[in-house]
Amino acid sequence: MMNTQNGLTEKSGTWRRCAIAIAAALTAGAPLAVQAQTQNQTQAAPAVSTGAAAVAPADAGSAGWLPDLGKLTATGGVIQVEGAGGGGLTPWALITGYGTRDSYGANAHYTYISTQDYKLTSYGVAVGLLDRVELSVAKQKFTGSLAPLNNLSIEQDIFGIKVKLVGDAVYNQDEWLPQISAGAMFKRNNGINGLGAVTNVKQLGSASDSGIDYYLAATKLFLAQSLLVNGTVRFTKANQMGILGFGGDKSDRYEPMLEGSVAYLINRKLAIGAEYRMKPRNLSADNEKDYYDAFVAWFPTKNVSLTLAYVSLGDITVYNPKRQEGVYLSLQAGF
């Protein structure tokens, strides 16, 4: 009788392992909604006993400091041009990285934007802690290629913080409430090179060479429809993100600017979408226009993503008065 019971137990364990393997194989190609449901069921499953003793998991204590990569692929977003987690132009409410509320994540990015007359590069690092707090640092470099601004070079440092306030974009599928986060970007313009006697953005009419952007972002992910929608309200005085300083001769007060993103997840590795970002108009020397883009983002693994977009940055200074359109390319690596 004892041998029969042991045989039945071993067969039961074998069948269970086969079932788990089959479920894992099916989930690998499943849409995000199925992946989320499978992940929830797996987390809720009880321990399995074999004979008189339970099968104990491997000792996790020695590896407890490693990131768990527990979020679904692509749900961490990418790093936007100012260093925050989100889309290309707009910060989202999502916290960067794939760490869950019991872990952490981080990403490094390099972004290149090229239009007819200008180039903008951005690189930096962002860290997500406990899926609650995000800290970021980024550096931007803006250069000209057409006279009289062909020698122009401006650099800016950006330090960011974001805190999730309420909601969960992935797991609150049966609630109307989106994930909502508040954030701030502390920006410092490092001056102007290549314009002779003009060495500071204040000489162009800006009120200050440093400033802070404050924003509130709401992100809703509809897993069944593979659709992400984000809305952000940013309070800012920044001219061209701060590249041309903050405030100016036309206005030197904080104004609310609306920003929006829509992304459709074709599958768990590929997303397409578009973004729009309002801009203030503070300077007589810069007839600033709103930004927008259309993008495709590829997530071959949770450790790497690549974003390619068409981007329009509007007019940039009265010296080259034409709409600046071009290519946006961003590489991100992390966990």
Image (cartoon, helix red, strand yellow):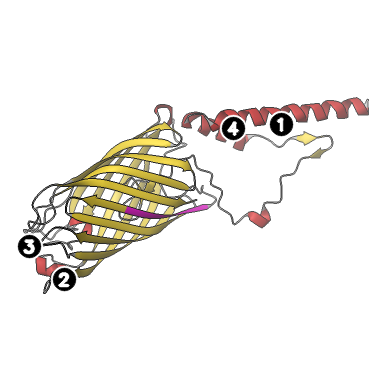
Q: Report the residue marked by disc 4.
A: 41
Identify the amino acid type marked 2: Asn
Whichever of labels 4 and 2 marks the residue nearer the N terminus, that label is 4
Query: Residue 303: where, in percent of width, then height?
Result: 49, 48
Tag 3–tag 1 contact (CB < 8 Å) = no
Q: Amino acid at mark 3?
A: Asp
Along the viewing direction, whichever of 39 and 19 lies nearer the viewer? 19
Q: Does residue 19 appear to the left or right of 186 in the view shown?
A: right
Residue 175 seen from this side: no
> What is the CA distance from the residue labelled 2 to the residue labelled 1?
66 Å
3 vs 2, front mark: 2
The spot of residue 142 in percent (x, y) is 23, 60
Q: Which segment did they paint magenta?
A: 104-111
- Return the disc, 2 or 1, that comes first in the chain's sequence: 1
Residue 267: which quarter of the image?
Answer: top left
56 and 156: which one is in front? 156
Tag nearer the camera, 3 or 1:
1
Q: Which secondary structure class fits the magenta region best?
A: strand
Label placed on residue 76: none
Please name the residue that numbered disc 1 is placed on: 17
Q: Which numbered marker is on residue 200?
A: 2
Q: Nearer the viewer, mark 4 or mark 3?
A: 3
Residue in the foreground of this view, choosing between 211 and 325: 325
Give the quarter of the image for residue 213.
bottom left
**Cα–Cα span, label 4 and label 1:** 16 Å
- At numbered mark 4, what does the secondary structure look like: helix, strand or loop? helix
Tell me where residue 84 appears, x and y as whole percent: 35, 53
Sequence-earlier tag: 4 or 1: 1
Residue drawn where x is 21% and y is 65% of the image: 153
The residue pinned by badge 3 equals 249
